[in-house]
Image (tube, grey):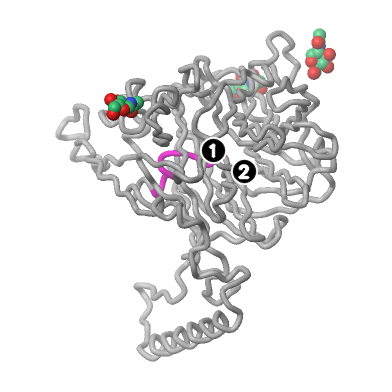
Amino acid sequence: MRMRNKYRKPTTFHCNAGSRCSLSAVVWSLVGCLLMLHLYSLVCHKDGVGGDIQLRMSHHPLFRELEEVEEENIQIPPPRGKRSPRAAKRRPKRTTTLIDEFLDESSSLRHIFFPDMKTAIDPMNEARNNSFYYSPGRIWLDTEGYPIQAHGGGILYDEKSRTYYWYGEYKDGPTYHAHKKGAARVDIIGVGCYSSKDLWMWKNEGIVLAAEETNETHDLHKSNVLERPKVIYNEMTGKYVMWMHIDDANYTKASVGVAISDSPTGPFDYLYSKQPHGFDSRDMTLFKDDDGVAYLIYSSEDNSELHVGPLNQDYLDVTRVMRRILVGQHREAPALFKHQGTYYMITSGCTGWAPNEALAHAAESILGPWETMGNPCIGGNKIFGLTTFFAQSTFVIPLPGLPGSFIFMADRWNPADLRDSRYVWLPLTVGGAADGPLEYNFGFPLWSRVSIYWHKRWRLPYGWIGKK
Ligand SMILES: *[C@@H]1O[C@H](CO)[C@@H](O)[C@H](O)[C@H]1NC(C)=O
Ligand SMILES: *[C@@H]1O[C@H](CO)[C@@H](O)[C@H](O)[C@H]1NC(C)=O
Ligand SMILES: *[C@@H]1O[C@H](CO)[C@@H](O)[C@H](O)[C@H]1NC(C)=O
């Protein structure tokens, strides 16, 4: 699997091994650095800590304990399988990494990444203990005791019913390969919907947009692909609008589909699909801004860049406005959020079902330019950090009343049995100085740092749950 380290910004004062760094250059660099730091502190004092330059933690104190760094110490078993001494000599022995173990269905560490049903989180049972703990990677049951089926999901907070709705791919079917080189897949079953008041205990509201069983030319025919459904509410029309990635089994259709409903729990009527702005579109998401303007963000040009553009007033189509962002960076699985007027986005690299390194990006305007800040993942261990905790971003949930605090939602895909893919929900905070020095600001932290903290087990602050 590929790591996308090459997109990391180089450190500012870097001496190559081959070139000699003269002493005077180092001294002058240091003097320059100190001067800049001094100037920076002056600016901060003068303006107070405001705008985008923020050094203090801006999020809620209740959230702070979730920022403790939790380490994972996993012993990697010795390489298995018989190998003749000669073969071992000839081939340079590859060190077994945690990623190999993760991708190996028969690994003795399987239970760490995909704990079995015995450890499932059952809110109906645990609620009596007033637990409310998230356990990333464990099976998560709904209020009827069935594993939640809402992969590649997104959350809508419905003001009218004061309820959270979680929409995602309902994948409770067999995993297979349509042909030899095809990716692992599950036939379309539909979009699952779950409701909750506390973001922890979820009631199954059924399949709100179902696959088409017989009509083979229909976008939703079960042999096709429906991924990453996202729902937003349109105040003007009073409709709930769903956008999703629509594709054929070979991912050549590369389109978005649109569906509409009068109720958050459906049923949704499927309207049509298209290639937005005339471009291929695969992983996508929606973002509804404070002013009611909604945006479609999608991976395009064969996943080499992202496109962002506003929807029209009824949210049923894109407009002609589109900007290319993160060009040449090969990012997918976008998840957007906003904090104090700044837009943030988490993305993943493009390595199919295998996990890779997340990156955080920031922008003053949603249409760009977007700056890449670096890897937001903290804790676990090095490999956890380089694999987004063995998961892939799908959504970021704002927490009303806890400014600067969010829940990061990701999918831990299980390509051997996609229905058994797990949810990795973790606390995300915005605050402190970004660690990646950026091009346009002479190394000053223009953006706040985005941090996602690993926890084996964590919960929202006591005071918060149910209070809105
Ligand atoms: C709830 O608490 C009881 C008593 O402390 C304990 O025996 C039980 O295992 C707990 N249940 C869960 C699901 O944690
Ligand atoms: C099958 O689906 C296509 C595309 O949605 C539609 O145009 C056609 O009318 C449908 N055929 C039947 C028999 O429903
Ligand atoms: C997908 O590709 C395979 C192999 O190239 C081909 O046999 C198959 O017909 C294609 N399927 C679709 C739905 O395009």
Asked if residue 278 lies in the magenta stretch, the reply is: no
Asked if residue 390 lies in the magenta stretch, the reply is: yes
Query: Is residue 356 at least partly visible in the picture?
Result: no
Q: At label 2, which amino acid type do we have? A: Asn
Instruction: Classify the position of ligand 2 by quadrant: top left, top right, bottom left or bottom right.
Output: top right
Q: Position of residue 326 (x, y in %)?
A: 63, 55
Q: Is residue 227 above or below residue 434?
A: above
The residues tagged by marks 2 and 1 sit, at their Cα atoms, a distance apart of 40 Å
Q: Position of residue 421 (x, y in %)?
A: 46, 27
Q: At label 1, which amino acid type do we have? A: Gly
Residue at position x 66%, y 40% in the image = 285
Residue at position x 70%, y 38% in the image = 159
Residue stretch rendered in magenta on the structure: 385-394
In the displayed structure, does residue 99 sit left or right of residue 164? Answer: left
Q: Which mark is residue 303?
A: 2
Q: Position of residue 442 (x, y in %)?
A: 55, 77
Q: Nearer the viewer, mark 2 or mark 1?
A: 1
Mark 1: few/some/many CA within 10 Å (<14, 14-19, 20+): few
Residue at position x 59%, y 51% in the image = 345
Say which residue label 1 marks.
466
